[in-house]
Image: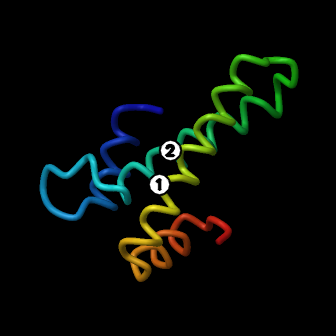
Amino acid sequence: MTKEKRQEIIAAFQRKEGDVGSPEVQIALLTGRIIELTEHMKKNKKDYSTSRGLITMVNNRKKLLRYLNSENHAGYIEITDKLKIRR
C-alpha cells in the first residue's frame, strides 16, 4: 500500500484530526491491505507465508469489527456498508 493511499484511507475514516488508532481507521487500513493481498494470492497460489499473513489480518479485522459492534453499533453498520464487508 502506498503512502498516499494510506493517507487517503486515514483521512476518510478518522474521527478527528490526527486520529490513526481508532477502530474505524484500523479496520479500513486492514481492509485495504486484505484486498491487495487477495489479489496477490490469486496470482501466487502457493505463497504460503503471505496466505498465513492474510488469514491473520482477516482475523484481526474480525476482532476489531466485533469490538466496534459492541461499543458503537451505528458506527459498525456504517463502516461495514462503506467498505462492503459482510456482517
Would you place residue 49 above or below residue 23 in this image? above
Mark 2 vs mark 1: give the one in front: 1
Quarter assignment of residue 46: top right
Residue located beneath label 1 in the image: 64
Mark 1 nearby-residue class (10 Å; few <14, some 14–19, many ≥20): some
- On screen, residue 79 versus residue 39, left or right, reads left
Residue farthest toward the right in the current orientation of the protein: 45
- Going from N to C along the chain, the mark reached first, 2 or 1, is 2
Please provide percent x and percent y for residue 30.
50, 44
Residue located beneath label 2 in the image: 30
Q: Measuring 61% from the left and 44% from the top, which residue is drawn there?
A: 59
Mark 2 nearby-residue class (10 Å; few <14, some 14–19, many ≥20): some
Would you place residue 57 above or below residue 18 in this image? above
Residue at disc 1, secondary structure: helix
**Mark on residue 35?**
none
Do tag 2 and tag 1 residues touch (Cβ < 8 Å)? Answer: yes
Would you place residue 15 above or below residue 26 in this image? below
- On screen, residue 10 versus residue 33, left or right, reads left
Q: Measuring 51% from the left and 61% from the top, which residue is drawn there?
A: 65
Would you place residue 1 above or below residue 81 in this image? above
Cα–Cα gap, marks 2 and 1: 10 Å
Quarter assignment of residue 41: top right
Nearer the observer, 20 or 5: 20
Q: Measuring 55% from the left and 39% from the top, which residue is drawn there?
A: 33
Amino acid on which disc 2 is placed = Leu
Please provide percent x and percent y for residue 18.
14, 49
Residue farthest toward the left in the current orientation of the protein: 17
